[in-house]
Amino acid sequence: KQSRRTTGIPVVLLDCFEMSVLFRDIEIIGKILGQEKKASEFIAYYDKYREMIDTQLKGVPIEKKPLVYWEGMSDYSTASSGDNEILVAAGGRNIAGDTPLSSSKVSPEWVLVRNPEIIIKCPGTSKVPSGYGITRDAMKKQHEEIMARSELKQITAIQQDKVYVLSRRAVAGPQSVIGLIYVAKWLHPELFQDVYPEKIHQEMLEKFYGLEYRGTWTYSP
């Protein structure tokens, strides 16, 4: 979408968030900056790993896809499958997928009844700092907080310590493919034994951002 303010300066409004429109947005940015070749290289890079995940998950029956409770920025907030592209693309079954939620808020009892096999927490970076140059302390503390929730102690994810924390910086925009790779490996470790998300992330940072790999984007037990 394009608009022109009264100053006469062209303004381009882009989403740069949802996976479904990301390639289009990157192409537009490439044209604006005169970096069409670099934009094409990044799209090809992203698409390579997206296709790799699709190929590995092809033919996996629905019953082999683990039940996942994806918790958002606040405690007991979640999203439907339609609002969670990464979880679906990574081969998970969203416990909120078949439930028409009038609000993103759910109760501990709601989670308990659905008994997720895996919990993925995606906190806000203001509450739980993460990303480039950040230590893992806050992410580790978030994991411990979820594990200590007495109201959830009976669910499979807690009993088997399959609780993961994922930075919001790894689930949106160009780095969303990194979040996708991490989640796919958490959900289907047997299919991605030879895939190392940290190395792929390091490669992306060096190749497209000119940065060394340094920081915290996930926490896993």
Image (cartoon, helix red, strand yellow):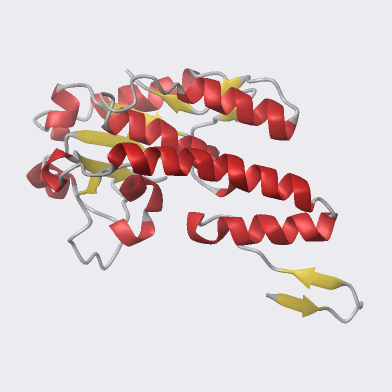
Query: Which residue lies at the image location 81% right of the left edge and 50% below the top edge?
Result: 35
The quadrant in which the C terminus is found is top left
**Residue 23: image x %, image y %?**
59, 56
* Quadrant hosting residue 203: top right
Query: Which residue lies at the image location 49% right of the left edge and 59% below the top edge?
Result: 20
The one nearer the camera, 204 or 214, is 204
The tally of labels here is 0
**Residue 206: image x %, image y %?**
69, 26
**Residue 79: image x %, image y %?**
32, 55
**Residue 194: image x %, image y %?**
38, 19
User: Does the image show residue 123?
Assistant: no
User: Does the image show residue 177?
Assistant: yes
Name the outermost residue toward the bottom.
6
Name the outermost residue toward the right.
7
The one nearer the camera, 198 or 159, is 198
Please give left or right for residue 189 compared with residue 122 in the image.
left
The one nearer the camera, 114 or 25, is 25
* Quadrant hosting residue 161: top left
The quadrant in which the N terminus is found is bottom right
Query: Which residue lies at the image location 64% right of the left edge and 22% below the top edge?
Result: 133
Please give left or right for residue 197 compared with residue 212 in the image.
left
- Residue 158 in the image: above or below residue 97: above
- Residue 13 in the image: above or below residue 4: above
